[in-house]
Image (spheres, rainbow, N blue to C red):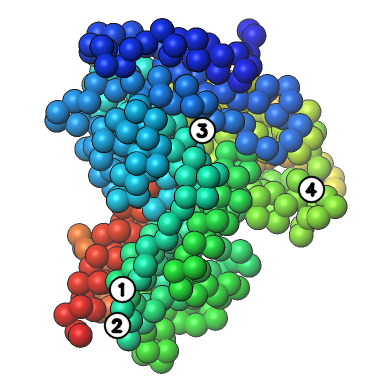
């Protein structure tokens, strides 16, 4: 199957746009405009580099895609947005070519549009409610809200139009933020805008949280995250790295000894789960977290400048079917693996990964071994992985998640020869903060329990993001960050 080049897609869009009079478009005309495909690197080329796969819309493409919006009066798309962006308004401005006005609308609600436009699952959020997609009975035909958001955010950055809000007059209040991922960044910005002093404490040597250590360069360029961090610092936010709350300093000590007036915990969910099967301690078995952190944060894909080595693999099996599994598989391919398998015990329909990421993985030659799950990992006399013993599955009735329950088929064992196994079946919350913080209430998974204002069981300590929700999206974490920041600002305002 031929892969259209970015040049072909852009030329087609320019020719189509030239035939359209936007002022004369009726709803049926808008719905007849084809979805604008995202230009990407050629699959054969991109597996040999770490550069971004999706290269972005052209001006003509973003206008065409924006013209597909029906500007519904009831704006159903907004109900799918965790931070309630005025989606029809920003799309309307994009359709007019007013990209500066478009990004201004987004930034009334969202701090990280260039990031969210790239990695958020819009098809399961705002685009799920799009009238166009529902009318055409296919969510993939919804208006490409995320792609439009990405374009106008990139336009702002590339044209040096980014304007940082001026903080209010100093209040004398101090707020500590634990973690510099999406939730922490959002809280830091909103609390700093209110005039409070803000310090972010980050456990790693670079800020950015999961956006830096978890998401590969080919999906989210780290330069974009770095610019967002720089913008925070320009606002006057202090960032301290290599500071592990719970070890470097107890959580409650930030208030009792360091004098902070409030603390927000956005430390994420970075403790990987394993399958608890025979062979998981063999050499060549990794959690997706470790594998991706070595590659992303410590640049293992660039041996001359790497801060860490990475395992040399020829045949890799990635266990799991989420976005992190896709990231790990596609990274392994770029690191030189000759063969990479995704092993998943359900079918593709039940996969939690984004359709786009699954599609990109297939284009890059990743093999999908569906309706299979490992029974044990096999090793040699040197303790190194040599294979996987797999069991075949069939689907039964739906389980609590709504997906059909996988049922093992007795006697269906088979051996898959591999030298590397990457486990990507989710994460739990790191228990360090819980263990070192008396009185902090958590659920059975170790997530911090909060109320509707993100207040924890300890006075002046708030929490949000993955440490509360479990593994969530960037924008869901931002939504909780926004809620927590409002609650912190209201609390501190009452004390002035």
Classed neighbour count for the residue bearing mark 2: other residues with Cα under 10 Å, few (<14), some (14–19), many (≥20): few
Residue 177 at x, y = what percent?
A: 42, 71
**Labels 1, 2: front one:** 1
User: CB of mark 3 within 8 Å of CB of mark 4?
Assistant: no
Query: Which of disc 3 and disc 1 is earlier in sequence?
Result: 1
> SS at mark 4?
loop
Measure the alpha-carbon separation of dots 1 and 3: 46 Å
The residue beneath circle 3 is 321
Instruction: Specify the label residue 214 is tagged with.
Output: none
The residue beneath circle 2 is 171
> SS at mark 2?
loop
In this rendering, does residue 265 appear at all?
no
Residue 440 at x, y = what percent?
A: 32, 74
Classed neighbour count for the residue bearing mark 3: other residues with Cα under 10 Å, few (<14), some (14–19), many (≥20): many
The residue beneath circle 4 is 302
Residue 423 at x, y = what percent?
A: 60, 43
Query: Which of disc 2 and disc 3 is earlier in sequence?
Result: 2
**Labels 4, 2: front one:** 2
Residue at horizontal 36 percent and vertical 17 percent from the top: 141
User: CB of mark 1 within 8 Å of CB of mark 2?
Assistant: yes
> SS at mark 1?
loop
Instruction: Specify the label residue 168 is tagged with.
Output: 1
Query: Which of disc 4 and disc 3 is earlier in sequence?
Result: 4
**Labels 1, 3: front one:** 1
């Amino acid at each position: 199957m031929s892969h259209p080049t970015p040049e072909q897609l852009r030329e087609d869009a320019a020719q189509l746009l030239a035939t359209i009079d936007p002022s004369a478009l009726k709803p049926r005309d808008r719905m007849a405009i084809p979805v604008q495909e995202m230009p990407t690197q050629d699959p054969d080329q991109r597996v040999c580099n770490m550069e971004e796969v999706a290269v972005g819309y052209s001006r003509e493409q973003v206008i065409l895609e924006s013209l597909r919006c029906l500007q519904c009066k009831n704006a159903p798309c907004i109900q799918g947005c965790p931070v309630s962006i005025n989606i029809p308004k920003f799309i309307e401005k994009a359709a007019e070519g007013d990209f500066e006005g478009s990004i201004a609308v987004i930034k009334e609600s969202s701090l990280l549009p260039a990031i969210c436009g790239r990695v958020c699952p819009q098809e399961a959020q705002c685009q799920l409610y799009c009238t166009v997609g529902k009318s055409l009975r296919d969510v993939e035909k919804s208006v490409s809200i995320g792609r439009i958001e990405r374009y106008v955010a990139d336009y702002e950055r590339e044209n040096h139009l980014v304007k940082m809000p001026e903080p209010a007059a100093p209040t004398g209040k101090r707020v500590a933020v634990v973690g510099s991922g999406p939730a922490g960044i959002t809280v830091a910005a909103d609390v700093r805008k209110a005039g409070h002093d803000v310090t972010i404490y980050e456990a790693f040597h670079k800020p950015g949280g999961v956006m830096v250590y978890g998401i590969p360069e080919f999906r989210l360029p780290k330069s974009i995250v770095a610019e967002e961090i720089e913008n925070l610092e320009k606002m006057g936010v202090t960032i301290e790295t290599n500071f592990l709350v719970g070890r470097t300093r107890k959580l409650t000590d930030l208030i009792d000894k360091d004098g902070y007036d409030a603390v927000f915990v956005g430390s994420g969910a970075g403790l990987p789960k394993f399958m608890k099967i025979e062979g998981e301690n063999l050499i060549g078995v990794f959690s997706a977290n470790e594998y991706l952190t070595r590659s992303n944060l410590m640049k293992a894909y660039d041996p001359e400048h790497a801060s860490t080595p990475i395992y040399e693999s020829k045949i890799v099996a990635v266990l799991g079917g989420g976005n992190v599994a896709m990231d790990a598989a596609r990274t392994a391919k770029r690191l030189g693996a000759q063969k990479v398998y995704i092993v998943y015990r359900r079918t593709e329909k039940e996969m939690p990964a984004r359709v786009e990421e699954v599609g990109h993985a297939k284009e890059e030659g990743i093999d999908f071994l569906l309706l299979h799950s490992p029974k044990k990992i096999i090793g040699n006399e040197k303790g190194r992985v040599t294979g996987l013993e797999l069991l075949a599955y069939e689907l039964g009735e739906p389980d609590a998640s709504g997906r059909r329950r996988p049922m093992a088929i007795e006697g269906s064992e088979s051996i898959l020869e591999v030298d590397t196994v990457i486990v990507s079946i989710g994460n739990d919350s790191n228990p360090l903060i819980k263990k070192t913080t008396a009185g902090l209430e958590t659920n059975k998974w170790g997530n911090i329990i909060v109320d509707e204002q993100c207040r924890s069981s300890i006075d002046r300590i708030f929490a949000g993001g993955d440490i509360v929700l479990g593994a969530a999206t960037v924008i869901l974490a931002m939504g909780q960050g926004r809620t927590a920041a409002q609650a912190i600002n209201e609390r501190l305002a009452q004390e002035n």
